Image: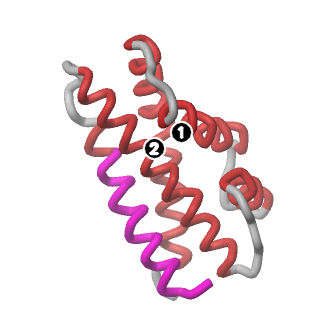
């Protein structure tokens, strides 16, 4: 894994996390706010696992799938609350491949609001660890 690809991944992830955080500050008075925030979450989670994979490969490890990447990052102490992270991957798959009722959309939004600080903490950790490579 090249340092340049990892740095590119970190830049993309940083922008996605900031976009997700911004989406959560918009008043939730319309369905597009919910749907837009869920979409930003899907993008962010996709970039999280890909960035984790690249960082792990940079360290000489070889995760193959999103779940492998999360499990390996948990095993080496980069992530905490493994079940929450695996749930985020599952959540991302569910929201991107299903039409959800209004109640499920609102519930997903609330769940995203709860896990976004964890995503931010993980990005900050990775950025601090690898931004100087």
Q: Which residue is mark 1?
A: 92
Region of the chain picked out in magenta, as a range? 1-20
Binning the other alpha carbons within 10 Å of mark 1 as few (below 14), some (14 to 19) or many (20 upward) gives many
Q: Which mark is residue 42?
A: 2
Q: Residue at x 47, y 62 (%)?
A: 124
- Answer with mark 1 or mark 2, whichever residue precedes in sequence: 2
**What secondary structure is the stretch in magenta mostly built from?**
helix
Task: Indicate the position of residue 122 as horizontal and vertical percent values.
Answer: 54, 57
Q: Is residue 38 left or right of residue 92?
A: left
Task: Assign a secondary structure to mark 2.
Answer: helix
- All told, the count of numbered labels is 2
**Marks 1 and 2, how far apart at CA:** 5 Å
Residue 8 image offset from top left, x and y in percent: 43, 76
In terms of depth relative to the viewer, which is nearer, 20 or 118?
20
Residue at 77%, 64% in the rendered image: 76
Q: Residue at x 52, y 46 (%)?
A: 118
Left or right of 38 on screen, residue 50: right
Check the image and report above or below for 66 versus 1.
above
Residue 71, magenta (yes or no) = no
Q: Nearer the viewer, residue 77 or 20?
A: 20
Q: Are marks 1 and 2 in contact (CB under 8 Å)?
A: yes
Q: Tell me: residue 15, above or below residue 9.
A: above
């Amino acid at each position: 894994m090249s340092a340049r690809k990892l740095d590119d991944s970190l830049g993309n992830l940083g922008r996605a996390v900031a976009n997700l955080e911004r989406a959560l500050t918009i008043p939730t008075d319309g369905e597009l706010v919910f749907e837009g925030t869920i979409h930003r979450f899907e993008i962010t989670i996709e970039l999280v696992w890909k960035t984790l994979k690249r960082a792990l490969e940079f360290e000489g490890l070889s995760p193959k799938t999103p779940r492998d990447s999360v499990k390996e990052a948990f095993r080496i102490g980069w992530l905490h609350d493994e079940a929450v992270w695996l749930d985020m991957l599952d959540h991302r798959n569910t929201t991107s491949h299903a039409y959800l009722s209004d109640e499920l959309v609102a519930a997903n939004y609330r769940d995203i609001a709860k896990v976004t600080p964890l995503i931010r903490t993980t990005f900050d950790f990775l950025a601090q660890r690898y931004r100087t490579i």
